[in-house]
Image: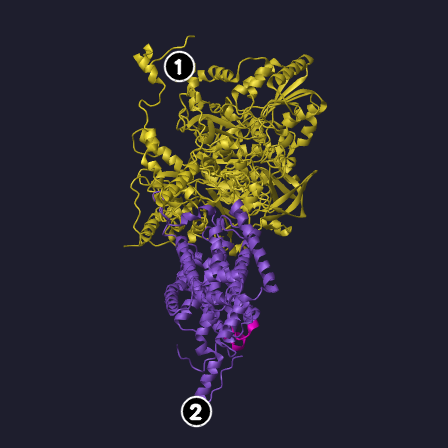
């Protein structure tokens, strides 16, 4: 156990005991679903179903039901794909990198963030799969032995790399998430009263009894998975950015893309975590576990990554000017001043200008402002992907082929449907699984609980040191 | 007949008892079945492993058996195979495409008895220095598309009487009775045809008139060129359209004559015209082309100097040109109004150039006013053009219609003076200026017979419709020019119960001969004696059918005895010019659609207009200035435009507006040939009929009208175009130079290319070697006139689907080769070729146009190839960027990464190749796509069996006609020789009337394409991307004194190393 300064504000508020923690967190799982949960889940499920119908429509009639065309081969589909993948990144960052950096505050949000990663990757995967003209042949992407030569996929293609990057990412994230869940599921199992709950949570807990050997293996596996996940945080979006960076299209062909994309991904991911957590902590009464300090920490990351993203935007403009490459220059002038100017300026406002407000401490600690900003940032990051994909494609090298693109109702519905899918999955998760990692919270209670902090402070005073007020927690 | 017995051995013959005993057994020895089933193997209980093995085997065997369906093949072999047909190998037959307006000698490619492609004809009977040679070797978009009109379900499939299906017997009996009755009554008969080129048919009609002496032959063409013929009759005593020879012209002046697009014989003129446009280091001279016109035509867009006039100023311009030349040569001037502005300057310069190159000038005018044409004759006579650039001896036989005769016929019909009207190939109920009047008049004719091959507007009004064959099902001949004969032969058994029109006439005359015999007799009697090569008439006939053409010597007409009263003609023509008031309307033919006969050919409807790039419509062309002044808006992005009512005299129609730079500010233009309502599934209701605006007065028909009013309607119209950006943004993809600059450094490009190749070598990747053939192409931007014949040829050759107007509007067109058209403008600040500088344009009429055929560049370092996740697009060892359609999963990444944007995705099930029919594009509830009939079983017969029909969700693009490459290689192989130049020709290359495309093996140092690649004018588009294209473009050279955009570009320095 690490010693922690009494100066650090407590991460768990209200003088909690282990039992209280368990009860606070498992309450939502054990209680009957509330009316609001039913309403929210029903709406999400309807939206999801509509999205799935539109996917079926697309597969049945063809990609021609979308607004894509000869010039613009990717539009909302890949925009949404990159957006969702980016959102997923926060989960991995929180579970892996913050773990390695010993950021204990991550325990309050990591479970939900990891769940968000899984669902976001599922949503993301919908798009590259169903944007294929012949989705029934999607398995051609996989390097399996075959009788056609054998004919392998093209390992030079960034789309091929995507297949590996995303599937690895999904697998590792899923394992990490589930490994963390096992002790908590066992807790729920042990507290379960109905036969079905006992049986099902029992099955899901993989026979966890909390023995020392179990804990040792659990810790070991978590560490190994954290080790594997860490490079993934950087690699996945780097590879996604290669889809664009390795091409020849002005506006895509940029070496700055990997760091720019990774920063953007974390930026948008944290925004999405905030959106979800701010609702969850309110609805499930978990304010004592997801405190304003958590929110502030995340807002600090947002201001950092937002600034990186802003720098990247300006660097792109500089490079375009400095390169004296007419195509590059035109592409960027066209982004800002061309027919899609609104998306560029939307992106600039949402991603570069507005996060700078988080330099103000008061705003960083304002729940409502943070919630508003989290939505703004997610819009901004969606604009960013739209700007990169559509405005680069719509006017590239040969002016005869310049064209415009706008989505059809089918594309819009699939996007909205993916949000429906995400929330349906998240709501079911929030109802059936502890949204906060109980075991990990218990783990840090001794160092970061409010009672313990107070005791440490008292002991400190007792030894006759200067008095320091407890840092303000509100 | 007694049954014969066959026996296998003596035992069988003798019915040996031992043999009889064994005879019915299947196996000579008993099979040990009992042994096996009684053995321990069977009785042994199966263990778990065996069970699993058996289970595994049976499941997988069942799966395999169930999934490997063997398709049922229904191949019906020939009972007696025709000697010339080898399944899978194409046969080519010489024939002639002529429809009353367009003429083209063609070679028809047939596969297994189906004509599938039109190729240009080259005939051994036409000598290399024949003045007729330019009629051969090129095609037009319409000639290319004519094969599709064969497989048109809307063609009449049997004769009909008053619209009801009938048999030939009944129709023949009734008609013959009526004709005989009319003959006895003395009722007058008229055979109404467009200009006939067939000498045999003309003879046959003469015979018909002999049989029915009250009959008369009236010639009516929807597009009349009678002005020229009348002028020649007045001046030279010959009522003909002369033969023009642009190949001999160093200076060409055209006043509203769109001779490269639609005027008289555009394919021939294109071939002639480009002879003096192909500049190289050894041939640095080039013809200079002045053009005055009221709209932006295909010809005007290729001119070196162009100025805008009003349609009514044709006479003024011609007289002004006469006066300038007269001033320079000391002849007397005519009285006429003055031109002003740029037109005046261009005329003055043209006059100087014409006088400086006497005998090598050619002046043509599009006016149909005989008086204007008389002044043109006077100019050409002054310049000594007769005998060099104009031939009255080898005159054209096309366009001989007489407006007077037609008017007389209509009057007679109205009076009820016509008893019988036989229409053959004409459709005045649609394309006559007074179509309504004709439709009324025809009701007063007792017997009306249509021999048209289509159920068109006129046939619908006739009592009897005795449909003619399609030309590909017919025997015929043609004499497009004096002394030149070409043959038309059937290449397929008639698809429907139609009958050749000439056969019908013969039948009705009581002649039992068939038309084949008739033509043959005609040729043997009239053509055969004029030659000495063939000693017997049968071999002469056979060779003419094989070679498709025959020419004989023609005496040139002495033009020195001309009687030209230019002054009187000038006065008369100026009177008309002065009378013109207000806004003027030009009526023109579109390069694809022509006079509207082919409205039901989706290939032509979907071929973008070379200038406007609009498909599936006609529209009112207005200048940007006019649009601004009248508040007319066209939104190219939203594909919407304003609707207006055009009114002239009593005629008024609603049409959409197209804002066309280069269009005259004081006139508007509208295309003829649209607004059909009885053309068929695809053509009906497309566009608006502008023929009612045509004005006829006495002997002349005018295709422009003054006093037009335009009223803006509060309505928007959806207009589909394939290109929505006008300027090339000053980018290097387009390179042009002025002749002067070019002549200074014709070899400059060579050093640039060397530098480039040095840059290309800077790569980490090993260079791919092409040890055998390396296919490449070169496209001469100076020869390419932008006519679009290649695009239709490509569509026919490669089964490129038609998507319809709605899908074109959604930017889903499928063309593998397109012609990019860019504008630049002259202003005081120099040339404007970037859109952001458009505000500086002083006059949108000062336009320069450049065409660039764009197709897959088959890059050796192709951006599309490395991004495909499944290797569906890859590079062949012969440098082809190839598509494995069945590997493609449709990510569209390749299309995104293609800098040339030539890849085409099958967005919907355009070809109906999907296994089920319920998702065809026109069945998508929300898209409103119209079925153009391109996928019905009949029309699909036009598909090229050598080319895969692509399925939904698959990417496609130009393959460099890989099937032709394969065919050429196999051909060389079977002949046991290496591949040589000419073995492989791409479809676009053969179709091109301008020979702008060369194609072949770049490894062959002697090949034309290799030489073109090494030429000083050759450059690679977007070469700086290191895509290493296999297509070189040859810089456009403008024969102007001013600098052109390319001249101002900084020259790339050669890299020395």
Cα distance in 3D space between marks 2 and 1 = 135 Å
- The disc placed on residue A464 is 2
Mark number, residue B660: none
Q: Residues within 10 Å of mark 1 (few under 14, many from 20)?
A: few
Colour assignment, chain A: purple
Query: What label does residue B535 carry, if any?
Result: 1
Q: Quadrant of the N terminus of chain B?
A: top left
Along the horizontal axis of the image, is B160 left or right of A445?
right
Whether residue A362 is in magenta: the answer is yes
Which residue occupies the foreground of this view, B647 or A215?
A215
Q: Please state the horizontal and vertical placement of residue A40, each as a whole percent of the image.
A: 59, 62
Kindly indicate whether the residue at mark 1 contacts the one at mark 2 (C-beta within 8 angstroms).
no
Labels 2 and 1 within one chain: no
Q: Is residue A86 above or below residue A456?
A: above
Spot occupied by residue B868 in the image (x, y as percentages of width and height)? 40, 49
Chain assignment, label 2: A
What residue is at 61 percent from the left and 64 percent from the top?
A: A35
Quarter the C terminus of chain B occupies:
bottom left
Q: Which chain is yellow?
A: B
Mark 1, secondary structure of its residue? loop
Q: How many marks?
A: 2
Asked if the magenta segment contains residue A288, the reply would be no
Give the side of residue B611 with respect to residue B754, left or right.
right
Mark 2: secondary structure: loop
For residue B281, say whether it is visible: yes
**Image depth: mark 2 or mark 1 in front:** 2
Range shown magenta? A358-368
Residue located at (40% from left, 72% from top):
A101
């Amino acid at each position: 156990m690490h010693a922690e300064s009494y100066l650090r504000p407590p991460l768990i508020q209200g003088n909690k005991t282990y039992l209280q923690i368990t009860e606070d967190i498992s309450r939502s799982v054990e209680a009957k679903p509330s009316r609001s949960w039913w309403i929210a889940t029903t709406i999400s499920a309807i939206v999801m179903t509509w999205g799935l119908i539109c996917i079926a429509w697309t597969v049945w009639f063809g990609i021609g039901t979308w607004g894509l065309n000869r010039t613009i081969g990717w539009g909302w589909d890949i925009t949404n794909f990159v957006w969702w993948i980016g959102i997923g990144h926060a989960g991995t960052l929180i579970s892996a990198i913050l773990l390695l950096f010993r950021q204990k505050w991550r325990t309050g949000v990591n479970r939900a963030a990891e769940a968000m990663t899984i669902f976001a990757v599922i949503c993301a995967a919908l798009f590259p799969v169903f944007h294929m003209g012949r989705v029934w042949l999607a398995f051609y992407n996989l390097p399996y032995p075959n009788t056609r030569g054998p004919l392998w996929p093209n390992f030079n293609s960034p789309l091929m790399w995507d297949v590996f990057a995303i599937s690895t990412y999904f697998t590792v994230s899923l394992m990490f998430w589930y490994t963390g869940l096992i002790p908590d599921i066992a807790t729920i199992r042990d507290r379960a009263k109905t036969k079905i709950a006992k049986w099902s949570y029992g099955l899901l807990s993989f026979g966890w009894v909390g023995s020392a050997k179990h804990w040792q293996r659990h810790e070991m596996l978590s560490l190994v998975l954290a080790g594997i996940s860490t490079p993934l945080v950087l690699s996945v979006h780097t590879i996604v950015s290669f889809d664009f960076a390795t091409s020849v299209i002005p506006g895509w062909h940029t070496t700055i893309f990997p760091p720019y994309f990774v920063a953007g991904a974390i930026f948008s991911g944290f925004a999405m975590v905030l959106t979800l957590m701010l609702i969850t902590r309110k609805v499930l009464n978990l304010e004592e576990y997801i405190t304003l300090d958590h929110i502030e920490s995340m807002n600090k990351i947002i201001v950092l990554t937002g600034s990186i993203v802003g720098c990247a935007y300006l660097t792109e403009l500089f490079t375009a000017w400095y390169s004296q490459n007419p195509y590059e220059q035109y592409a960027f002038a066209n982004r800002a001043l061309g027919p899609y100017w609104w998306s560029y300026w939307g992106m600039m406002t949402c991603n570069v200008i507005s996060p700078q407000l988080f330099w103000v401490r008061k705003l960083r600690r304002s729940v409502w402002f943070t919630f508003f900003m989290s939505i703004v940032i997610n819009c901004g990051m969606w604009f960013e992907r739209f700007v990169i994909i559509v405005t680069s494609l719509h006017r590239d090298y040969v002016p005869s082929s310049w064209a415009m693109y706008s989505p059809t109702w089918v594309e819009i519905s699939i996007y909205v449907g993916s949000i429906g899918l995400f929330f349906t999955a998240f709501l079911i998760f929030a109802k059936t699984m502890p949204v906060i990692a109980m075991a990990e919270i218990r783990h840090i209670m001794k160092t970061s609980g409010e009672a313990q902090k107070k005791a440490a402070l008292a002991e400190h005073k007792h030894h006759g040191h200067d008095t320091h007020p407890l840092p303000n927690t509100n | 007949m007694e049954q014969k017995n066959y026996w296998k051995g003596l035992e069988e013959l003798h019915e040996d008892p031992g043999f009889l005993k064994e005879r019915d057994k299947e196996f000579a020895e008993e099979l040990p079945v009992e042994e096996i089933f009684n053995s321990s193997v069977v009785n042994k209980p199966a263990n778990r492993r065996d069970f699993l093995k058996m289970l595994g085997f049976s499941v997988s065997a069942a799966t395999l058996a169930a999934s490997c369906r063997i398709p049922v093949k229904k191949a019906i072999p020939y009972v007696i195979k025709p000697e010339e047909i080898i399944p899978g190998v194409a046969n080519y037959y010489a024939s002639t495409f002529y429809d009353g307006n367009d003429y083209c000698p063609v070679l028809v490619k047939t596969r297994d008895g189906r004509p599938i492609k039109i190729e240009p004809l080259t005939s051994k009977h036409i000598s290399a220095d024949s003045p007729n040679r330019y009629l051969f070797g090129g095609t037009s978009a319409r000639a290319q598309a004519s094969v599709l009109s064969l497989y048109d379900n809307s063609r009449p499939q049997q004769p009909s009487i008053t619209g009801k299906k009938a048999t030939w017997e009944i129709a023949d009996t009734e008609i013959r009775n009526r004709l005989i009755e009319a003959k006895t009554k003395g009722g007058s008969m008229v055979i109404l045809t467009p200009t006939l080129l067939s000498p045999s048919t003309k003879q046959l009609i003469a015979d018909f008139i002999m049989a029915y002496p009250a009959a008369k032959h009236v010639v009516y063409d929807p597009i009349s060129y009678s002005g020229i013929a009348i002028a020649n009759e007045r001046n030279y005593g010959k009522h003909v359209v002369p033969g023009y020879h642009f190949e001999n012209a160093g200076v060409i002046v055209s006043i509203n004559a769109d001779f490269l697009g639609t005027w008289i014989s555009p394919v021939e003129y294109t071939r002639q015209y480009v002879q003096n446009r192909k500049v190289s280091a050894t041939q640095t001279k080039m013809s200079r082309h002045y053009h005055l016109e009221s709209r932006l035509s295909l010809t005007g867009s290729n001119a070196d100097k162009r100025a805008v006039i009003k349609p009514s100023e044709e006479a003024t311009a011609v007289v002004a040109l006469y006066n300038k030349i007269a001033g320079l040569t000391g002849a007397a001037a005519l009285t006429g109004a003055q031109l002003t502005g740029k037109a005046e300057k261009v005329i003055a310069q043209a006059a100087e150039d014409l006088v400086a190159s006497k005998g090598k000038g050619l002046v043509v005018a599009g006016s149909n006013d005989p008086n204007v044409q008389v002044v043109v004759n006077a100019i050409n006579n002054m310049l000594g053009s007769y005998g060099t650039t104009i031939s009255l001896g080898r005159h054209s036989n096309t366009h001989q219609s007489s407006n007077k005769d037609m008017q007389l016929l209509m009057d007679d019909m109205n009076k009820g003076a016509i008893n019988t009207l036989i229409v053959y190939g004409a459709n005045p109920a649609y394309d006559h200026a007074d179509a309504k009047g004709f439709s009324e008049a025809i009701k007063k004719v007792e017997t009306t017979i249509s021999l048209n091959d289509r159920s068109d507007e006129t046939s619908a009004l006739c009592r009897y419709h005795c449909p003619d064959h399609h030309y590909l099902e017919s025997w015929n001949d043609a004499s497009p020019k004096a002394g030149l004969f070409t043959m038309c032969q059937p290449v397929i058994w008639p698809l429907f119960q139609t009958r050749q029109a000439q056969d019908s006439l013969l039948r009705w005359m009581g002649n039992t001969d068939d038309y084949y015999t008739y033509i043959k007799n005609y040729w043997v009697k009239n053509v055969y004696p004029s030659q000495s090569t063939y000693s017997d008439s049968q071999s002469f006939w056979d060779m003419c059918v094989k070679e498709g053409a025959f020419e004989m010597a023609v005496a040139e007409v002495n033009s020195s005895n001309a009687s030209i009263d230019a002054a009187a003609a000038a006065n008369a023509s100026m009177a008309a010019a002065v009378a013109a008031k207000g806004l003027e309307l030009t009526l023109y033919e579109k390069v694809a659609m022509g006079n509207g006969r082919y409205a039901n050919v989706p290939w032509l409807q979907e071929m973008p207009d070379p200038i406007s790039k609009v498909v599936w419509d006609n529209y009112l062309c207005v200048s940007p200035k006019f649009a601004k002044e009248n508040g007319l808006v066209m939104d190219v992005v939203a594909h919407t435009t304003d609707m207006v009512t055009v009114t002239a005299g009593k005629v008024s129609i609603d049409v959409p507006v197209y804002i066309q730079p280069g269009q005259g500010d004081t006139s508007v233009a509208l295309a003829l040939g649209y607004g059909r309502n009885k053309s068929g599934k695809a053509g009906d209701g497309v566009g608006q009929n502008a023929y009612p605006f045509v004005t006829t007065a006495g002997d002349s028909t005018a295709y422009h009208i003054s006093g037009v009013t335009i009223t803006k309607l509060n309505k928007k119209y959806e207009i589909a175009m394939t290109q929505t950006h006008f300027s090339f943004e000053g980018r290097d993809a387009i390179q042009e130079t002025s002749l002067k600059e070019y002549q200074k450094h014709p070899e400059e490009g060579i050093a640039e290319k060397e530098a480039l190749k040095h840059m290309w070598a800077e790569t980490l990747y090993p260079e791919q070697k092409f040890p055998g053939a390396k296919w490449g192409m070169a496209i001469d931007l100076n020869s390419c006139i932008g006519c679009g014949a290649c695009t239709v040829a490509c569509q026919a050759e490669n089964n490129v689907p038609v998507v319809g107007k709605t899908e074109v509007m959604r930017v889903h067109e499928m063309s593998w080769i397109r012609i990019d058209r860019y504008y630049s403008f002259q202003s005081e600040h120099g040339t404007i070729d970037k859109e952001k500088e458009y505000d500086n344009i002083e006059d949108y009429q000062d336009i320069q146009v450049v065409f660039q055929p764009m197709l897959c560049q088959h890059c050796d370092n192709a951006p599309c190839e490395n991004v495909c996740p499944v290797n569906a697009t890859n590079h062949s060892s012969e440098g082809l960027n190839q598509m494995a359609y069945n590997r493609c999963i449709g990510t569209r990444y390749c299309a995104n990464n293609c800098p040339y944007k030539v890849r085409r995705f099958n967005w919907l099930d355009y070809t109906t190749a999907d296994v089920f029919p319920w998702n065809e594009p026109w069945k998508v509830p929300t898209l409103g796509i119209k079925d153009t009939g391109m996928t019905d079983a009949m029309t699909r017969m036009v598909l090229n069996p050598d080319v895969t029909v692509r399925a939904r969700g698959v990417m496609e693009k130009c393959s460099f006609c890989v099937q032709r490459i394969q065919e050429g290689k196999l051909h060389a192989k079977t002949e046991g020789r290496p591949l040589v130049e000419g073995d492989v020709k791409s479809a676009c290359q053969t179709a091109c009337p301008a020979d702008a495309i060369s194609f072949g093996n770049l490894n062959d140092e002697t090949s034309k394409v290799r030489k073109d690649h090494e030429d000083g004018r050759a450059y690679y588009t977007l070469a700086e991307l290191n895509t290493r294209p296999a297509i070189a473009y040859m810089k456009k050279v403008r024969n102007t004194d001013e600098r052109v955009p390319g001249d101002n570009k900084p020259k790339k320095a050669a890299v020395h190393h």
